[in-house]
Image (cartoon, rainbow, N blue to C red):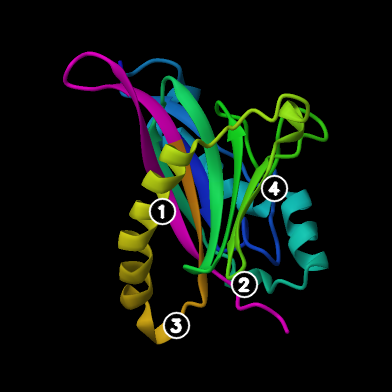
Amino acid sequence: MEELRFRSSSNAEDNQDFSGAGLYESHHAFYTYGNPTDTVSHSIRAVWASVWKPEAYQARKQAGIVQETVRMGILVYPIYRKEESTGVVFYYSPDDIAIVANADNENVQNPTIAGLAPEMHRISESGYARTPSSRYALSKKKILSQKDRQQLMSLLEGVVPKFQALYADQQVAGVDVEFKVLELPDPTGKERDVVMLKQIRPLAPRSN
């Protein structure tokens, strides 16, 4: 029985001007009949309806977002097993990239651990820098390994230019890319890390 995740993917969340962390809902569903709250149609309606929750409306109002411009899409993916890490990339150019990552499936924008600071990776003209997660402040343990980061960068090099070309009329300044690192078996039966991009969205232009 396949379990799916229906995640909010609106134009009013997870960007540098307005994160919207925790405002919208995500739901799961199964390819089966049974409990009406576990059906695909119920999950889709619940995610769509979360746009107009009072707290979401008020948060957008305070941020100066025009309510009539808000649109809700839904990201659908299978429930993953053996998640090594999850994160978000803020990409403006090959020399202007910020990566934030948390271990396992811990949410970056709205973590379940109060005060948890994610691991930070910064790529700029002056070089590369990493700041450990507060979860590993003493051990300095890496959440995103160098090999995983290289795999992520390779995917971004292929995807970002195509996304910008697809929306050339909008002159996309930068993008917000969500990713996961999964532990999957290779042809020999051994486990290997695989970076998977979940979604990509345009970022608002930087304010000077």
The residues tagged by marks 4 and 2 sit, at their Cα atoms, a distance apart of 20 Å
Horizontal side of residue 70 vs 192, given as left or right:
right
Q: Amino acid at mark 1?
A: Met
Residue under label 2 = 68
On the image, the x and y values in percent for residue 101 come to 59, 40
Residue sticking out furthest to the front: 126
**Amino acid type, mark 4:** Ala
Asked if labels 1 and 3 touch by Cβ distance under 8 angstroms, the answer is no
Q: Which residue is mark 4?
A: 21
Q: Earlier in the sequence, mark 3 or mark 4?
A: 4
The residue that label 1 is drawn on is: 153
Does the magenta segment cover residue 102? no
Mark with earlier residue (4, 2): 4
Tell me the residue at 42%/27% (across/down): 29
Give the alpha-carbon distance from disc 3 to disc 4, as whole Å: 25 Å
Circle nearer the viewer, 3 or 1:
1
| Quadrant of the frame with the C terminus | bottom right
Please provide the residue range marked out in magenta: 181-208
- Front-most of residues 104 and 59: 104
User: Which SS class for mark 4?
Assistant: loop
- Judge whether residue 163 can be spotted in this image: yes
Foreground residue among 13 and 100:
100
Q: Nearer the viewer, mark 4 or mark 2?
A: 4
From the image, tell me which residue sits under label 3. Answer: 170
Of the image marks 2 and 1, the number of the one nearer the N terminus: 2
Q: Callout 3 environment at 10 Å: few (<14), some (14 to 19), or many (20+)?
A: few
Instruction: Estimate how packed mark 1 is, as few (under 14), some (14 to 19) or many (20 or more) residues with alpha carbons within 10 Å.
Output: some
Residue 14 image position (x, y, % from top left): 62, 55
- Calculate the distance from the C-alpha at mark 3 to the C-alpha at mark 2: 19 Å
